[in-house]
Image: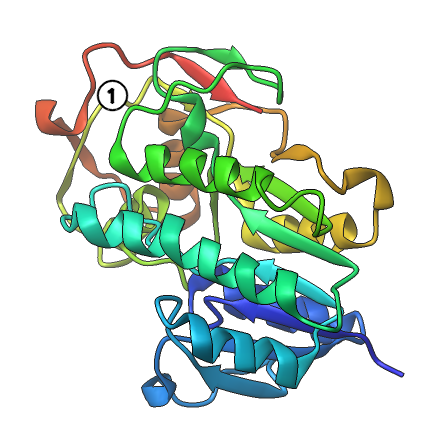
Amino acid sequence: MKKRILITGADGFTGRHLARQARLANYETHGMVRSLDVGSIDGFDQLYGVDLSDGASLTRLINDIQPDYVVHLAAISFVAHGDVEAIYRTNVVGTRHLLDALATASHKPQAIILTSSANVYGNSTGGILDEHTSPKPANDYAVSKLAMEYVAQLYMDRLPIIIARPFNYTGIGQADNFLIPKIVSHFRRKAAFIELGNIDVARDFSDVRTVVTSYLRLLQTPQAIHQVVNVCSGRAYQLSEVIEMLALLSGHQLDIQFNPDFARSNEVKIFAG
């Protein structure tokens, strides 16, 4: 009999990739979205429209599905999102509603992944960071993710929670307001120039398919339960390297124009997991 996996944020960039990988791994895939207006999504056996703010509906959904595994991706994940209240309402309070529903369900999952972010480490600590690095969140998104981790601690004695802190990752389907898709889109349309911040900084970039495969492996790793785990490649790539690679692939040269609005005065040179 197939194991049931519930993926929240099913209509997001990561959720779509995770569903396809989970199906290949022979899971029965269930996806939760805020509204069913998104239509069908490839990779899911069933979709449900439930908002994280609706605790009662979440409880009914969990009891109906009885998931064996849960990967909680639903979040406001764009750092520069303008609605601060929405960030905390979704990322902190919404997660608490989900954990309440899971904690009171008659059928307990075997493992639950809560996706946090390497953003919790902040911008002031550089180098290769492990899970013992002290968090120093520097924006509301990062603060909300760290707060979510603390909320999760309240449920550790009742639920098999794994906290994943992914570093930067990218891939097909990521929105153009994220850095790598922004650069790729400029090369694809052969733009004359692009405005960027510092391009000599190095960041840990993974492929989204590697990240979702890591999530599925974590679900099957009992030692990961109640742990915080960095999801990363362990290698940092300079943005200038990324630009050179894209220029080689496309045969197009971009004029790189420095925009101080995209740079931080205290930006660390290397940030990797």
Q: Is residue 165 left or right of residue 12?
A: right
Foreground residue, 67 or 212? 67
Judged from the image, the secondary structure of the residue bearing numbered disc 1 is loop
Q: Position of residue 86 (x, y in %)?
A: 23, 54
Q: Quadrant of residue 209?
A: bottom right
Can you say which quadrant of the picture contains the C terminus?
top right
Please name whichever residue, 71 or 212, is drawn nearer the observer in this view of the structure. 71
| Towards the viewer: 127 or 161 | 161
Q: Is residue 172 visible?
A: no
Q: Is residue 228 visible?
A: yes
Please state the horizontal and vertical placement of residue 221, each as a whole percent of the image: 83, 46
Question: Residue type at mark 1?
Answer: Asn
Quarter of the image that includes the N terminus:
bottom right
Q: Which residue is mark 1?
A: 198
Image check: 1 left or right of 106? right
- Residues 48 and 187: in front is 48
Q: How far from the left and from the top, in percent, is residue 118?
A: 48, 31
